[in-house]
Image (spheres, rainbow, N blue to C red):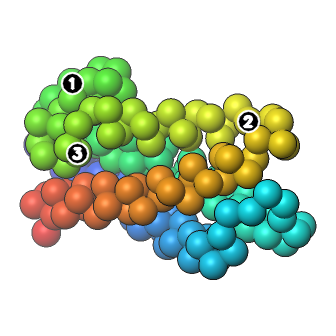
Amino acid sequence: MSDAAIRTLMANLENLAASLNWLRRSFTSCDKIGIKTTYTEDEFDQFENLSSRYARTTDLLINKILRSIDAVELVDSGSVIDAANHAEKRGIIDSVSQLRELKDLRNEIAHEYETEDLSKLFALVLDATPRLFVLADRTVKYCGKYTG
């Protein structure tokens, strides 16, 4: 365990905390709006913010935090699947498929171009965000042994 790896983990955790703060803000707004077939321009903007913040937070958690934990524990993280397998062994996630679902939705957000399908996508993001909060909380708690 190197000091540099711990500093990187701590910096990534700070970024995650900021991202989670914005995600919670967006989630609260969108949860009040609820799922509709059509949205006002302001509501649409709020769901767009939620979706992009969900994607960013998912990226931070998977691509930065889980890999940082591997670096602190001197484990070669390799692919995203390897990092997910390590997270499952650590008890951070219940199953690799749980993480894959969150990541797949992130990918769907990044590649969604059909505006007619956005209502369905918004519903999926609204449903998945609480699971992302739980996973992030579990990850931060796990990292507590390194960040004091």
Amino acid tagged 2: Glu
Tell me which residue sits at (73%, 57%) in the image: 48
Tell me which residue sits at (68%, 63%) in the image: 35
- Nearest to viewer (mark 2 / mark 1): 2
Quadrant location, the C terminus: bottom left
Circle 1: is it few (<14), some (14-19), or many (20+) Cα within 10 Å? Answer: few
**Residue for badge 3:** 93
- Are discs 2 and 1 less than 8 Å apart at CB? no
Quadrant location, the N terminus: top left
Amino acid tagged 3: Ile
Q: CA distance from mark 2 to mark 1?
A: 33 Å
Tell me which residue sits at (67%, 37%) in the image: 110
Circle 3: is it few (<14), some (14-19), or many (20+) Cα within 10 Å? Answer: many
Q: Is residue 41 left or right of residue 102?
A: right
Instruction: Find residue 112 and name its label.
Output: 2
Secondary structure found at label 2: loop
Secondary structure found at label 3: loop
Q: Earlier in the sequence, mark 3 or mark 1?
A: 1
Amino acid tagged 1: Asp
**Residue for badge 1:** 76
The image position of residue 56, as x and y in percent, is 56, 50
Secondary structure found at label 1: loop
In the foreground, 90 or 15? 90
- Nearest to viewer (mark 3 / mark 1): 3
Q: Quadrant of residue 38?
A: bottom right
Instruction: Find residue 17 and name its label.
Output: none
Q: Earlier in the sequence, mark 3 or mark 2?
A: 3
Q: CA distance from mark 3 to mark 2?
A: 27 Å
Q: Is residue 56 above or below residue 18?
A: above
The image position of residue 63, as x and y in percent, is 41, 38
